[in-house]
């Protein structure tokens, strides 16, 4: 069977578009530190994390890296995937007036996904009214890419939440997310830049995974 030359070109064209989108996002991500500082921070992350944080008590149900995320990391020259959170979306997560995804500390599966420099930026923001946050990239399973900012907010019960802001509402609309949807959130690195991958899960996927966990 003969394959039209234009059809053969479609996957390559799609990949080129994905890479061009990634480059545009890189250019828009707020730069808080120099490239040399990022490289140094990445090299220190493992030792810093082990000495600063205790192992999370949250047990992951969906710990296998999705195939599409592996492919996205290959296309973007990314690495170091880490499952950081699983949660059901609350009303505020999908409220366009809020435009943010809350990531409560008590739901973190891993809390070692930030470099020392990024952690310092977050900590220095705590007592500021205007928080800078850490610029990042978010990608979904359709390889759409958004620029977002990670910030930390203290909550009324004395705890703290991370929040993804500045672009989250567009993610909600594009993925048709709604209250009660179950998601997993992954982090990875691309050219030293913090990236997140959003994985919405269907009820069938949740039921299948829960059944396997009981075996």
Image (cartoon, rainbow, N blue to C red):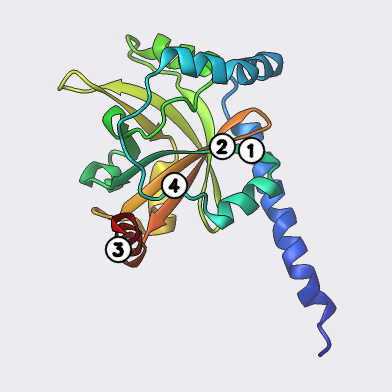
**What residue do we see at 44% from left, 47% from top?**
63
Check whether the beta carbons of the residues at disc 2 and disc 4 lie within 8 A of each other.
no
Task: Determine whether 177 is above or below 109 in the image.
Answer: below
| Sequence-earlier tag: 1 or 4 | 4
**Could you tell me how far apart the alpha carbons at marks 1 and 4 are, in whole angstroms?**
16 Å
Q: Nearer the viewer, mark 3 or mark 1?
A: 3
Q: Which mark is residue 79?
A: 1
Instruction: Describe residue 17's horizontal placement relative to residue 50 as left or right.
Output: right
Residue beneath disc 3: 207
**Could you tell me how far apart the alpha carbons at marks 2 and 4 are, in whole angstroms?**
14 Å
- The answer to whether residue 111 is seen in the rendering is yes
In front: 139, or 49?
Answer: 49
**Could you tell me how far apart the alpha carbons at marks 4 and 3 are, in whole angstroms?**
15 Å
Location of residue 130 (image quadrant): top left
Check whether the beta carbons of the residues at disc 3 and disc 2 lie within 8 A of each other.
no
Tell me the element at label 3.
helix
Q: Mark 1: few, some, or many residues within 10 Å (few <14, many ≥20)?
A: some
- The answer to whether residue 96 is seen in the rendering is no
Check whether the beta carbons of the residues at disc 1 and disc 4 lie within 8 A of each other.
no
Residue beneath disc 4: 63
Q: Mark 3: few, some, or many residues within 10 Å (few <14, many ≥20)?
A: few
Tell me the element at label 2.
strand
| Sequence-earlier tag: 4 or 3 | 4
Instruction: Describe residue 52's horizontal placement relative to residue 13 as left or right.
Output: left
């Amino acid at each position: 069977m003969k394959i039209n030359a234009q059809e053969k070109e479609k996957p390559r064209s799609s990949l080129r578009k994905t890479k061009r989108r990634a480059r545009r996002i890189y250019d828009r991500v707020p730069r808080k530190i120099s490239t040399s500082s990022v490289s140094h921070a990445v090299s220190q992350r493992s030792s810093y994390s082990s000495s600063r944080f205790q192992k999370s008590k949250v047990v992951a149900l969906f710990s296998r890296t999705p195939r599409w995320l592996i492919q996205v990391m290959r296309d973007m020259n990314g690495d170091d995937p880490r499952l950081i959170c699983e949660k059901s979306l609350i009303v505020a997560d999908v409220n366009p007036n809020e435009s943010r995804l809350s990531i409560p500390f008590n739901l973190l599966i891993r809390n070692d996904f930030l470099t020392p420099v990024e952690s310092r930026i977050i900590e220095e923001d705590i007592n500021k009214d205007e928080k800078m946050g850490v610029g990042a990239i978010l990608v979904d399973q359709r390889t759409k890419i958004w620029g977002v900012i990670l910030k930390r907010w203290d909550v009324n019960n004395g705890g703290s939440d991370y929040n993804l802001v500045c672009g989250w509402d567009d993610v909600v609309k594009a993925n048709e997310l709604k209250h009660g949807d179950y998601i997993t959130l992954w982090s990875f690195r691309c050219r030293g830049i913090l990236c997140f991958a959003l994985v919405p899960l269907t009820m069938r996927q949740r039921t299948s995974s829960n059944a396997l966990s009981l075996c």
